[in-house]
Amino acid sequence: MLKFLWISFWGKSVKQRRSRMGYLFLLPSLFFVTLHFIIPTIYNIVLSFSEWHIIRPLEFVGFEKYIDVLTSDEFWEALSRTLYFTLLSVPITITSALIVALALYRIGPRKGSALVRAMYFAPVVASLTAVAYIWTWMFNPAYGLLNEILKFFYLAPIQWLNDINQVIPSLSIMYIWSRLGFDMLILMSGLTAISPDYYEAARIDGANRWHSFWNITLPLLNQQLVLVCVVEIMMALKVFELPYAATNGGPVNASRTLVMHIYETAFQWNRMDEAAVASLALFVIILIVTALQHFFLSRKIHY
């Protein structure tokens, strides 16, 4: 009987046994994903079609909450600020990371190069909350380091986080500083994977450095560039810790991002149903943007 059960579960062939053993090792991960992602997502969808109350059961209301959220000025203002932050931060972050990666690749394994790479990567290890507190001190208009530098050069001090027109660019500086090292490391791994034979053949054909960069380096870095684009846009659209710790959404809600709007709607105003709709809208935006990036940016390169 036990032998029959053993053969029924594991199979007779070695291929069947290996396949089922693989599924067995996947069970802990599948349980974690189900518990922390699939079940909350399903509940969030159900909640978005319901009237939520802290003590009463859910009441189905159809698309009423979707209409309330999508016609709300607060939602669209928070989304516009988030998109502004993303469009300002992500291109500069990726471009700066590419420049640094090319410079470090050009330096090669010289003495001190490992320390330089570690210095660029160090901010990635720190939490965004710690980054926010560090830069809040540096941006302080009264005694901050950056304004002291401006005073040294007889320049007028800047309000940084205290001005509604300067707060998003100031937060972008924080974000770029904290994320540059991660992108640099990904791009460095892509650069080291490019065979030097391509550059040697290009030099023999008379190509200069710009031609080699445009026709060899960038195409062969396509996978890494698409990866950092996807990751950085996702991170920027979901940004929460930086504005929450640095400005708490101020001044006058000028740095109140979409995730901050979702957080306050759910946990300060106790409107879980509307927060569920806003979070689903953010999920759809990230999904569409990611799909478009893969469609328009991904290229198969063959040399």
Image (spheres, rainbow, N blue to C red):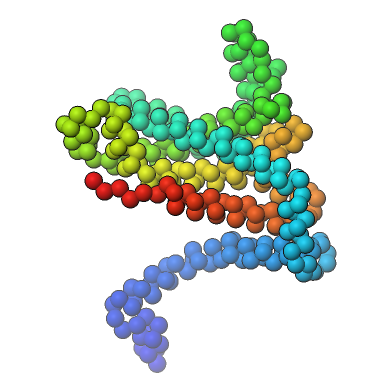
- The percent coordinates of residue 116 (x first, y second) are 40, 27
- The percent coordinates of residue 264 (x first, y second) are 75, 47
Q: Residue at x 64, y 32 (%)?
A: 168
**Of 217 and 104, the residue lying toward us:** 217
Q: Is residue 140 left or right of residue 237?
A: right
**Of 110 and 177, the residue lying toward us:** 177
- The percent coordinates of residue 150 (x first, y second) are 61, 13
Res 222 → quadrant: top left
- Identify the image quadrant of the N terminus: bottom left
Q: Total number of numbered labels?
A: 0
Res 43 → quadrant: bottom right
**Of 228 and 39, the residue lying toward us:** 228
Res. 267 in view: no
Res. 173 in view: yes
Q: In this view, does 182 lie to the left or right of 39?
A: left
Q: Residue at x 71, y 26 (%)?
A: 163
Name, please, the residue furthest toward the left.
Answer: 204
Up-down relation of residue 274 to residue 79 (above or below): below
Q: Residue at x 30, y 48 (%)?
A: 301
Up-down relation of residue 199 to residue 275 (above or below): above
Q: Residue at x 58, y 8 (%)?
A: 153
**Of 127 and 173, the residue lying toward us:** 173
- The percent coordinates of residue 69 (x first, y second) are 74, 53
Up-down relation of residue 144 to residue 286 (above or below): above
